[in-house]
Each structure stands twice: as C-alpha cells, then as structure tokens.
Image: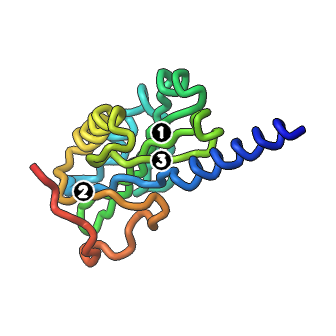
Amino acid sequence: MHRARHLFDICILLVGLFAGGCSSSATYIRATVPDHPLDRVAQQSQEQWSVEKVDANTLSMSDGWPAYSFGALGYGASHANLSFDPTTSELDVQYYFKAFPIMTLWIPFSIDAEPGAFGAALKSTMNDQINEIIKWSGGTIISRRAGDRSEPFPPKSKGKDSSWSPATP
C-alpha cells in the first residue's frame, strides 16, 4: 500500500510539473497583400492542410504531423488562423504547433515558431510552413512576434499595438 501511494505521489508531481511548465504561445504575423488572398491560400493549401473558411475574411487551417505523433505517442499539428482586413489590405496570421504527447500525460501545449530552445527541433519546419502560407497569400511580412495563444485574434486595434515588432530581413 505504501508503494502504491508513493507512486501515486510521484505521478501527481510529474503531472503538476508538466502542466505548469507547458507553453501556450503562438507566432503573430502581419503582412500586406495585394488583394484578397484567402481563396487562393485555401486552394493552394488543401492538399497538405485541413482548411475551414470561417467567413469571407477568415480562414482556419490545420496540418497533422504523423511522424511527430507516432514518436511522441500522442498527437501534434500545426494550426494557422488567417484574417484579412479589406480596408487596409493586411493579412494577420496566428500560427502555432499544438501537441498532446504522452510525456505530459496528454496535457496539451502549444509553441510558437520564434527562436528559442523550447521546441527548437520543430521550428525549422514550422517556419517553412509560415513562409509557404505567406507565399501563397502573395504577402510581404511587415511585423512578426511571439505572443500568448489566448490573445484575441484577429487583433482589434491594428496599428496601435506596441507589441508588434517590425519584421527582420
């Protein structure tokens, strides 16, 4: 009985450590586009991504990662939410990788594509996907930053948010 209780305590401790340390971040990108890009992005991405057109100016995309999912004994997928503002010809993108691996007892976490040690092995592929989405949109990145995934999306006050940083070449 004492051993079972000790094992239970260790499991609770591990769950607490993993859950408390789990990230919930996303990459936020703003790009100028020459015209309304969402139909074009949806068409060009449909072979690789699951695409849902939320409304005329909003697109939600996800792409499962089978190799990651198999290796992590869980599930992992990229998610991209796109919002086009026709008044400014700007495209806002929220991008993140979300996973439910066994090592966190399937407690989900998400990571952004910005430089950093957490999720470093995935970030090259994540940035390739972002570059592809921007290419499909015909856009030019004007700002890019990491942020919390729970931030309102699309942003409500474009141009007034000081946390947006200019894109680096």
Which label is found at residue 62?
1
Characterize the local packing of mark 2: few (<14), some (14-19) or many (20 or more) Cα atoms within 10 angstroms: many
Based on the displayed image, in which of its 4 quarters is residue 29 positioned? bottom left
> Which comes sooner in the sequence, label 3 or label 1?
1
> Which comes sooner in the sequence, label 2 or label 1?
1
Residue 125: percent from the left, percent from the top? 32, 32
Q: Nearer the viewer, mark 2 or mark 3?
A: 3
Tell me which residue sits at (32%, 36%) in the image: 129
- Mark yes or no: residue 91 visible: no
In this view, the residue in front, 55 or 124, is 124
The residues bearing labels 3 and 1 have C-alpha atoms spaced at a distance of 13 Å
Q: Nearer the viewer, mark 2 or mark 1?
A: 2
Which label is found at residue 144?
2
Residue 127: percent from the left, percent from the top? 28, 39
The residues bearing labels 2 and 1 have C-alpha atoms spaced at a distance of 20 Å
Tell me which amino acid carries mark 2: Arg
Do tag 2 and tag 1 residues touch (Cβ < 8 Å)?
Answer: no
SS assignment at label 1: strand
